Amino acid sequence: MIEDIVKVVVLSFIEGVTEFLPISSTGHLVVGTSLLNFNVMDSVFEIFIQIGAVLAVILYYRQTLRSHARQVRSEPEIRRFWLLVALGSIPAALTGFVFGSQIEALLFRPQVVAVSLIVGGLVFLLVERKLPDLQLDSGQSAAVTDISWRQAMIVGLVQVLALIPGISRSGSSIVGGMLAGMNRRLATEFSFFLAMPLLGGATLYKLLASIGDLDMSQLFLLFLGAALSAVVAWQAIDWLIKYIARSSFVVFGYYRIAAGLLILAATVVGWIA
């Protein structure tokens, strides 16, 4: 039991840290579960720690959500913003619904994660090198509700790539936002709002599909994982928002490349299957 608790703590920390940082939570969990050989209720555990991450972003933006709920009937700008959130969520949601099982069967392997991390890291470095000339970080007073239909659609289409483990949902949506002309802060905040319906809906769907697999004797581990993931994800969101106010995403690019190379090396020597 103690060993399982330690593994729950480790994997919950991984989920909480990586879900909203642009380094791929799915990729890290694929590698983490392989290294730890942790199979408590299989995918059900991952569903619960994702629930924790979803709750974290909802609670973090609870004041904004409460304000939007009060104003949605009277403010066209608020209605427009949530239509854009829905628009940005549709491409990945539809693709995942139709091809999710095939993608998981074919691509959820450490080797794919490693290559995706490296490719994503190179993309971040390239974007940060080329796009500052477009003054991406100008207009810091702009609100996330000011994004355009075109920007939301670009983000939604790029976000489809995140179905490949190692690409990162937050990373793809942030890069998509930057390519569409958003500054780092707007791209990151829009990524967080997209996580609410997209990650929340996917998690709820998987939970309902797996409800028959619930083992009541494992509820303690499941709720422990969800709680730890929520606390860590909250801290990760808060840290990232403060970080991007003064820094670029270059460090994440280098991290992704280093992590990908380490995973490739680990698969070669047989540490990860």
Image: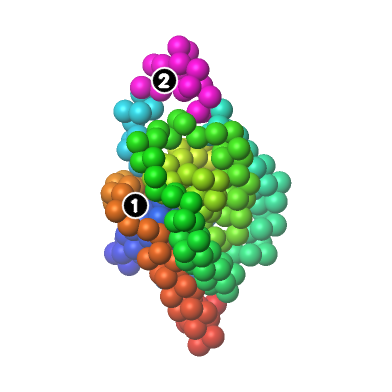
Camera-side residue of 15 and 5: 15
Amino acid at circle 2: Ala
Q: Which corner quadrant of the image does residue 9 belong to?
A: bottom left
SS class, disc 1: helix
Q: How crowded is the residue under tag 1: few (<14 C-alpha within 10 Å), some, or many (20+)?
A: some
Q: Is residue 151 left or right of residue 3?
A: right
Which residues are the magenta region? 67-82
Q: Residue farthest to the front?
A: 133
Q: Is residue 47 left or right of residue 64?
A: right
Q: Is residue 75 magenta?
A: yes
The relative height of residue 88 versus residue 67 in the rendered view (above or below) is below
Residue at horizontal 56%, vertical 38%?
152
Residue at horizontal 47%, vertical 56%?
133
Residue 244 circle label: 1
Residue at horizontal 31%, vertical 28%?
63
Residue at horizontal 60%, vertical 50%?
158
The relative height of residue 121 versus residue 212 in the rendered view (above or below) is below
* Residue 211 shows up from this direction: no
Image quarter in which the C terminus is found: bottom right
SS class, disc 2: helix
* Residue 74 shows up from this direction: yes
Q: Nearer the viewer, mark 1 or mark 2?
A: 1
Image quarter in which the N terminus is found: bottom left
Q: Is residue 269 magenta?
A: no
Circle nearer the N terminus (1, 2): 2
Camera-side residue of 60 and 119: 119
Q: Residue farthest to the top?
A: 74
* Residue 248 percent location from the top left of the image: 37, 58
Q: How crowded is the residue under tag 2: few (<14 C-alpha within 10 Å), some, or many (20+)?
A: few
Residue that carries the numbered disc 2 in the rendered image: 69
* Residue 105 percent location from the top left of the image: 66, 62
